[in-house]
Image (cartoon, rainbow, N blue to C red):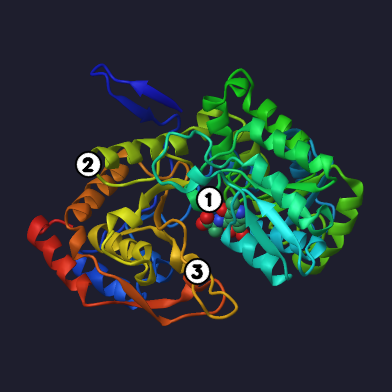
């Protein structure tokens, strides 16, 4: 993927692939969008795809596959045990991460379940740069606690810090001293730190974390689900990585980690996931959990087709042209929104464009879920589905009190190789229109609130009937246009 300079001086991301299979899209009129979001309880997870124009909910399991992936799927070797497909995947994992052992699992959170079951005991503390929703749930479910160790400025929405996902090493040392190494089953490093806007850590920082861990005989666990974007950022932003190939960088990082796990729904343009390690003892320990929760050791809940696609997808992830597409589209979208005064997280990260709801709708208090309200409003204004990443995505404390999220973001994910630049321009246009009319947006309150992972299927109502007014304004400004 190239950022091509046009004759006029402008820089535009240029796709280094062509589209050969297409799927028809439907853009429902604003009246239907209003009905659909009400039906969904203002929770974008509960919208149906039929009612969605651009699905920017997630980059998980919705990345476009290549011709090589699709053709590999045709030669998959179906067998419960010992398939040749598994051998091919295992040797690809060994090439990319340098790991001898690979334990397959049906997706990323299944790996988290296995790791939490195997290592976390009640009262334990797991230090990490930042939590991810499913990770935290598995650790707290086992009676453990998560401690987040980003630098203080990492959660400031606008910044010039190229590595907001870095650990604050002083905080890490202090946590180890305070909690004691025996209470720390592992340190988790999340590549492309999801909940703070897909922000990377530097290779140097990851190596420094691993050194500290080794000094204290603590295991390091890399969540490589978003390594693809993080890899692009270290390659383009970190001096020591610029002359290394993506494969060399990946192997270097992997060589410092005890355990690596990933969701192949993100890494490898596929589905599924897995855990790898070079530590024989750890692999033996984790194996039992794979057969108990996932499936036999040569498929782990995945179909052989998924595994073939993953093997090819991992190879493609070592190609800079391939991995730059997502970050460059995201950067384009963030820049265009910023030019129009829309507050977005900077520097532009991986995964998607993150709109800062705390400032977009600064008239809505956090207890009325500004990011959730903005996600619902974006859908009404555009038929685009984004995801709330703020207080709604938090879980209530044991005593029922509600923790307020440090950031209130609406994530507009950029599934890799899926959207065109004109679709991204449409998104920019409708979101800037909404920004002009932001005072029409009001808050939300729960009418159905599940206890665990409430953001997935909780339902909310709009406070004060603001949605109708927003739809009316849309009609006024856009006439017959969708
Ligand atoms: N780790 C990270 C950093 C993730 O972003 C995800 C999933 C997981 C683990 C869990 O993997 O979904 O395969 O079970 N993130 C998705 C998202 C859900 O939309 O950001 P999974």
Q: Name the residue under label 3.
A: 403
Q: In this view, does 9 lie above or below 472?
A: above
- How many angstroms separate mark 2 from mark 1 (CA)? 25 Å
Q: Which callout, 3 or 1, points at the residue further toward the start of the chain?
A: 1
Which one is in front, 398 or 472? 398
Q: Is mark 1 on a helix, strand or loop?
A: helix
Q: In this view, does 332 lie above or below 147?
A: above
Q: Does the residue labelled 1 lie within 8 Å of ligand 1?
A: yes
Which one is in front, 134 or 29? 134
Q: Where is residue 468 in the image (x, y as percent from the top left)?
A: 18, 72
Q: Mark 1 points at which residue?
A: 194
Q: What element carries label 2?
A: loop
**Numbered disc in front, either 3 or 1:** 3
The C terminus: image quadrant: bottom left
Q: How many numbered marks does the figure carry?
A: 3
What residue is rendered at 26% in x and 19% in y? 9
Q: Which callout, 3 or 2, points at the residue further toward the start of the chain?
A: 2
Asked which quadrant contains residue 37, the reply is: bottom left
Dot label at residue 340: 2
**Numbered disc in front, either 3 or 2:** 3
What residue is rendered at 21% in x and 77% in y? 465
What residue is rendered at 22% in x and 71% in y? 467
């Amino acid at each position: 993927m190239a950022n091509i300079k046009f004759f006029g001086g402008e820089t535009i991301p240029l796709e280094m692939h062509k589209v050969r299979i297409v799927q028809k899209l439907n853009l429902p009129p604003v009246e239907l969008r209003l009905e659909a979001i009400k039906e969904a309880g203002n929770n974008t997870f509960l919208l149906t795809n039929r009612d969605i124009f651009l699905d920017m909910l997630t980059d998980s399991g919705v990345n476009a596959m290549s011709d090589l992936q699709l053709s590999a799927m045709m030669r998959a070797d179906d067998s419960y045990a010992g398939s040749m497909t598994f051998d091919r995947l295992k040797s690809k994992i060994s090439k990319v991460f340098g790991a001898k052992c690979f334990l397959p699992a049906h997706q990323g959170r299944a790996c988290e379940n296995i790791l939490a079951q195997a290592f976390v005991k009640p009262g334990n503390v797991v230090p990490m740069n930042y939590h991810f929703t499913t990770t935290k749930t598995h650790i707290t479910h086992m009676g453990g606690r998560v401690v987040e160790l980003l630098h203080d400025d990492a959660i400031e929405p606008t910044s010039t810090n190229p590595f907001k996902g870095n650990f604050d090493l002083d905080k890490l040392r202090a946590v180890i001293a305070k909690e004691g190494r025996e209470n720390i089953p592992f340190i988790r490093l999340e590549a492309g730190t999801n909940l703070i806007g897909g922000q990377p850590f530097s290779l140097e920082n990851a190596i420094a974390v691993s050194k500290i861990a080794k000094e204290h005989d603590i295991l390091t666990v890399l969540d490589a689900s978003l390594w693809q974007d993080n890899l692009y950022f270290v390659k383009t932003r970190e001096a020591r990585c610029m002359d290394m190939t993506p494969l060399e960088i990946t192997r270097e990082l992997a060589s410092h980690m005890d355990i690596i796990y990933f969701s192949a729904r993100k890494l490898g343009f596929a589905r599924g996931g897995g855990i790898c390690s070079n530590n024989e003892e750890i692999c033996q320990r984790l194996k039992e959990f794979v057969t108990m929760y996932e499936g036999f050791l040569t498929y782990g809940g995945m179909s052989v087709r998924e595994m073939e696609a993953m093997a090819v997808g991992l190879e493609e992830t070592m190609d800079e042209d391939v991995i730059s597409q997502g970050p460059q589209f995201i950067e384009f979208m963030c820049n265009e929104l910023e030019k129009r005064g829309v507050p977005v997280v900077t520097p532009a990260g991986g995964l998607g464009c993150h709109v800062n709801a705390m400032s977009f709708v600064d008239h809505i208090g956090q207890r009325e879920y500004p990011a959730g309200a903005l996600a619902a409003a974006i859908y009404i204004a555009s038929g685009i589905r984004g995801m709330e990443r703020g207080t709604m995505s938090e879980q209530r404390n044991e005593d029922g009190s509600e923790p307020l999220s440090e950031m209130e973001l609406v994530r507009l994910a950029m599934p890799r190789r899926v959207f065109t630049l004109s679709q991204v321009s449409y998104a920019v246009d409708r979101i800037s229109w909404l920004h002009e009319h932001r005072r029409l947006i009001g808050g939300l309150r729960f009418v159905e609130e599940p206890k665990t992972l409430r953001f997935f299927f909780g339902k909310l109502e709009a406070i004060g009937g603001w949605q109708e007014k927003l739809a009316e304004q849309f009609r006024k400004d856009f006439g017959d246009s969708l």
